[in-house]
Amino acid sequence: MPLSRIVMRLARNPGTEFAGGDDHRGYALTAPLTPEGRLDEAVYAKSRDACTVRRFAPDEDAVDGRLARRGSRWFFDYDDSDTVDDEPVHRLGEHRFAVGEYVTVTDEDGRPLTYKVVEVQPAR
């Protein structure tokens, strides 16, 4: 089952301390994509354990988690012991993961921040 490695970096977020963006903050995902670049639900169901996320920032240790789905909602989950959506991603199932596209992730403080897809390649 082919998986993709997707890297998203913090884009400009006016009105926040990240008004100019920050290339050193972001996410690296491993997930299955359709030929159109959207999350592939059928492949995800078969490869759920291989679908991971890593949050990185210069002022904190990288945090590893997994791409998770509950109903039609996708989110990043960093703690298997609770059922709270650690970081919900706005309409993640509808996003197209292609270089130059934007994705909004709600951070741990409840702020929606925009990230830009900067890399999509086959996962190793």
Image (tube, helix red, strand yellow):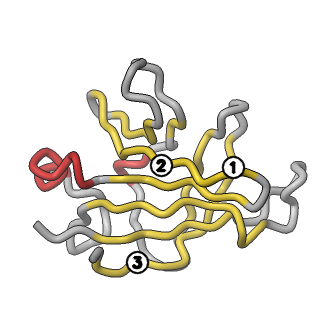
Where residue 25 appears, as percent x and y from the top left, is 69, 62
Labelled disc at residue 64: 2
The secondary structure type at the circle numbered 3 is: strand
Question: Measuring 86% from the left and 68% from the top, which residue is drawn there?
Answer: 20
Which circle, 3 or 2, is nearer the viewer?
2
Q: Which residue is mark 3?
A: 120
- Looking at the rendered image, the quarter that the N terminus falls into is bottom left
Q: Left or right? Give the position of 9 relative to 50.
A: right
Labelled disc at residue 113: 1
Q: CA distance from mark 1 to mark 2?
A: 19 Å
Where residue 107 appears, as percent x and y from the top left, is 65, 39
* Mark positioned earlier in the residue sequence (1 or 2): 2
Q: Left or right? Give the position of 61 relative to 12.
A: left
Q: How many numbered marks, from 0 up?
A: 3
Residue 18 sits in quarter: bottom right
Above or below 15: residue 24: below
Question: Measuring 34% from the left and 62% from the top, which residue is drawn there?
Answer: 30
